[in-house]
């Protein structure tokens, strides 16, 4: 499929802090309901309905809230077999941040610029985030996506086994 890599909607989240870092891995939420389902239902799908997504593939990482049955079922209803996810129709390897453009490029790039002036208020932090995101040019994202295809080509012969040297080869 020509330009397949341009049809993938990568998803992820990042955390921004005013003063210090909180290790979110130490935070656990126990609930009978998955907040990810509400997020997808109330925000994501309505936004998708404003765009032509018939050819779009959706990729997400293997976080538990993303791969819960209710979440996967909801995304399958929306994307069908065009879901790239752990436990999805197209499997995404666990702990693969070196393959996800949002992880290996976008969040570091955005945070380096957001924190450049050391924001002291939430309004300033949010404003910085919005400005940095708005200033990202499509050409930059195209180069990042092209790099992701190079990364995939690089690991394909290994059938997904760990390759720590990938950072030094790209």
Image: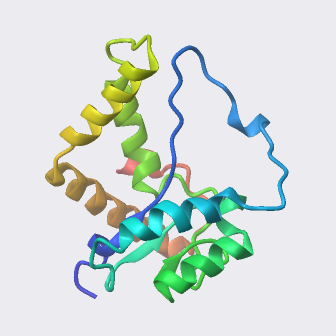
Q: Tag count in the figure?
A: 0
Percent coordinates x, y for residue 32 in the rendering: 84, 61
Q: Which residue is at the front of the view, 83 or 73? A: 73
Q: What is the quadrant of residue 163 in the picture?
A: bottom right
User: What's the coloring here?
Assistant: rainbow
Percent coordinates x, y for residue 4 in the rendering: 30, 79
**Residue positioned 53% across, 52% down in the render:** 97
Q: Which residue is at the front of the view, 128 or 154? A: 128
**Residue positioned 77% across, 62% down in the render:** 33
Q: Is residue 85 above or below residue 14?
A: below
Q: Which residue is at the front of the view, 16 or 121? A: 121
**Residue positioned 60% across, 67% down in the render:** 93
Q: What is the quadrant of residue 3 in the picture?
A: bottom left
**Residue positioned 72% across, 69% down in the render:** 68
Asked if residue 94 shows in the view, the reply is: no
Q: Is residue 140 above or below residue 49?
A: above
Q: Is residue 105 above or below residue 61?
A: above
Percent coordinates x, y for residue 115 in the rendering: 38, 20
């Amino acid at each position: 499929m020509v330009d397949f890599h341009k049809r993938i909607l990568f998803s992820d989240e990042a955390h921004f802090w005013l003063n210090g870092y909180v290790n979110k891995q130490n935070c656990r939420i126990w609930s009978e309901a998955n907040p990810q389902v509400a997020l997808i239902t109330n925000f994501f799908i309505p936004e998708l309905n404003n765009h032509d997504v018939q050819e779009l593939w959706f990729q997400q990482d293997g976080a538990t809230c993303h791969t819960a049955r209710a979440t996967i079922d909801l995304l399958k209803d929306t994307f069908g077999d065009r879901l790239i996810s752990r436990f999805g129709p197209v499997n995404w390897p666990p702990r693969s941040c070196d393959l996800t453009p949002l992880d290996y490029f976008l969040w570091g790039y955005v945070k380096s610029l957001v924190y450049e002036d050391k924001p002291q208020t939430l309004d300033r932090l949010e404003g910085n985030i919005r400005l940095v995101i708005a200033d990202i040019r499509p050409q930059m994202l195209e180069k990042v996506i092209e790099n992701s295809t190079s990364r995939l080509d690089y690991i394909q012969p290994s059938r997904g086994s760990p390759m720590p040297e990938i950072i030094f080869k790209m």
